[in-house]
Amino acid sequence: MKQILVMTRFFGVALVLGALSLPISAQTPETPDAQVQRIVNEVIEIIRTDPKVQAGDVKRVRELLDDKLLPHFDFKRMTMLAMGRNWRVASPEQQTALVEQFKTLLIRTYSGALSQYKDDKIDVKPSRARPDDKDITVRSEVIRKGESPVSVDYSLVLGSDGQWRCYDVIVGGVSLVTNYRDDFNQQVKNGSIDGLIKTLTDKNQGGA
């Protein structure tokens, strides 16, 4: 869990970059990386100028997440990867509960980081994706004055609706879902899948 806490600061930016919607259309001349950069700029502008976000208004931050960001994350795939082999032995009801609680945990843990990003720059690297690719990585660097750049890479999968969604974030070479997988596997080993669900639910129902 220590590495997860280290990643908290930069996953706020990951949520920003998650605000991507990349429909496959002949009328869309932008490349995936160019569109990601454009939408990132739009969302960061909201963060910088919205006084409620700057003040840490939890309700307003959640509205921003719900409206601009969350639709573009594949939380089911993220949960499957975080659960590893334990996903296959979970019942459909347990899988539904795991996705919901993991999604809520990520939102609660990292949404507060959004209001901290005022002067950061995000440099999205040119994509090398081929037209027929359905699973790609968009690479970027987070640049903060007086600090070394931090690499933040995004694993994206193309959905049946023709839109790309993020299912993993790699900060400085460390995968978000892999870190959670280690913790989740240990909790299941020491207890059960229901025990993991209860642990996540208790965290999500705790204080902000």
Image (cartoon, rainbow, N blue to C red):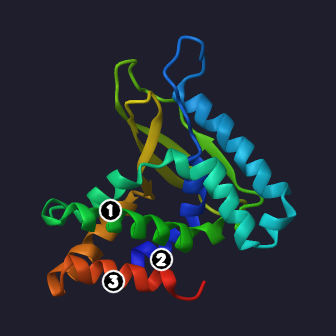
Q: Earlier in the sequence, mark 3 or mark 1?
A: 1
Q: Is residue 144 above or below residue 139?
A: below
**Mark 1 sits on what residue?**
96
Q: Position of residue 169 (x, y in %)?
A: 44, 54
* Residue depicted at x 64% and y 48%: 68
Compared with residue 19, is residue 143 higher up or lower down, i.e. above or below? below
Q: Which residue sits at x=81%, y=56%?
A: 48
**Residue closest to the eye, 134 or 23:** 23
* Residue kind at label 1, given as amino acid type: Thr
Q: CA distance from mark 1 to mark 2?
A: 25 Å
Looking at the image, do the residues carrying marks 3 and 1 touch, with CB atoms under 8 Å apart?
no
Q: Nearer the viewer, mark 1 or mark 2?
A: 1
User: Depth-wise, is mark 3 or mark 2 nearer the camera?
Assistant: 3
Question: In terms of depth relative to the viewer, which is nearer, 38 or 102?
Answer: 102
Residue 135: where, in percent of width, then height?
Answer: 34, 34
Instruction: Identify the amino acid type marked 3.
Output: Lys
Residue receiving disc 3: 198
**Other-residue count near label 1 (Cα within 10 Å), few / some / many at <14 / 14–19 / ≥20:** few
Q: Which residue is mark 2?
A: 5
